[in-house]
Amino acid sequence: MVRIGAILPQLEIAPDPETLRRWVVAVEEMGFDHLVVYDHVVGADVSGKQSDPRMQKWPAGHYNYRDLFHEPLVLLGYLAAVTRKIELSTGILILPQRQTTLVAKQAAEIQVLSGNRLRLGVGIGYNHLEFEALGVPFARRGDRMGEQIDVLRELWGHELVDIDKPQHRFGGVGLNPLPSQPIPLWLGATSAIGFDRVVRQADGWICPGGALSPAVQGWLAQLDEALGKAPPRERPLGMDGRLDMRYRADDELAREAARWRELGATHISVNTMAPYNRRAEKLDVDEHLAMLRHALELIRG
């Protein structure tokens, strides 16, 4: 049975702890299976910088310094304390920007304190200005992330580790406490090389679009191609599809939810935030919760 989740509308609702608590408690009480939080450490002022050729590759809906982002792992620590059963997931954490061993420690801590409710979604990111602000190389970030995934699993799975890889060399150290259950590690990807990494290293794929989108159809074809080339998997690959609610008719939303099921999605994550070209049209927390209730009615019938 497909698991239904809610994406935190962090760009639109107030950042105070009581508003966040109200949202997540209501989402859990509604019966959602998981929640998703997004990640950017800093936003950029892009005015006058469009001539930068690297910026030409940014997605049309890129974020700037006016867009509100919580630090995901700190936030999930708080949300773990005010919930009891809902899965806590990042969709995605920009892993190459961060110290691998510190991410391993933070994620293990959330897994321990939440009672094994973490699903860690990671990706490579696109904002070179953000990488520069963090003092991390932007080039070859995909290779770095691939190596990081292996190191994370080593750190989570052993009391002591010795790592000898091109970008990670250390040994005689270990995390304590260790998670009592493996932390599911999912990847966001929209390129052929990214899908190769998904099928080789991940427990699942996080899709950044809707099943009726032509772009998503192309990504699914790339995913199928990567699966066909890869050795057989021990466990099926999970798929987390997105369902964008705003400014869409109910019949279209119902068709998209049904399409995700047909495609074999294991998760559907509901987004109630406005699309990038209408980002100023914000709703309050109660309006977002009402939309999520409606989403459950459409998806579950």
Image: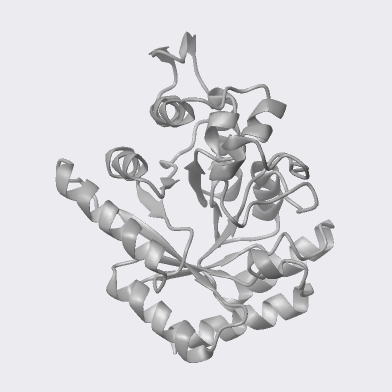
- Residue occupying the point 63% across, 46% down: 39
Q: Measured along the vertical axis of the image, is residue 285 above or below residue 298?
A: above
Q: Residue at x 67, y 70 (%)?
A: 274
Q: Position of residue 65 (x, y in %)?
A: 78, 46
- At 58% from the left and 24% from the top, the residue drawn is 99
Q: Kindly tell me whether residue 11 is visible in this rendering.
A: yes
Number of residue marks: 0
Q: Is residue 108 above or below residue 47?
A: above
Between residue 158 and residue 142, name the one nearer to us: 142
Image coords of residue 260 (percent x, y): 36, 72
Q: Position of residue 249 (x, y in %)?
A: 54, 89
Question: In the displayed structure, would residue 26 be above or below residue 42?
Answer: below
283 left or right, relative to 181: right
Asked if residue 209 lies left or right of residue 127, the reply is left
Q: Quadrant of residue 286?
A: bottom right
The residue closer to the viewer here, 207 or 270, is 207
Along the horizontal axis of the image, is 245 left or right of 41? left
Q: Which quadrant of the figure contains the N terminus? A: bottom left
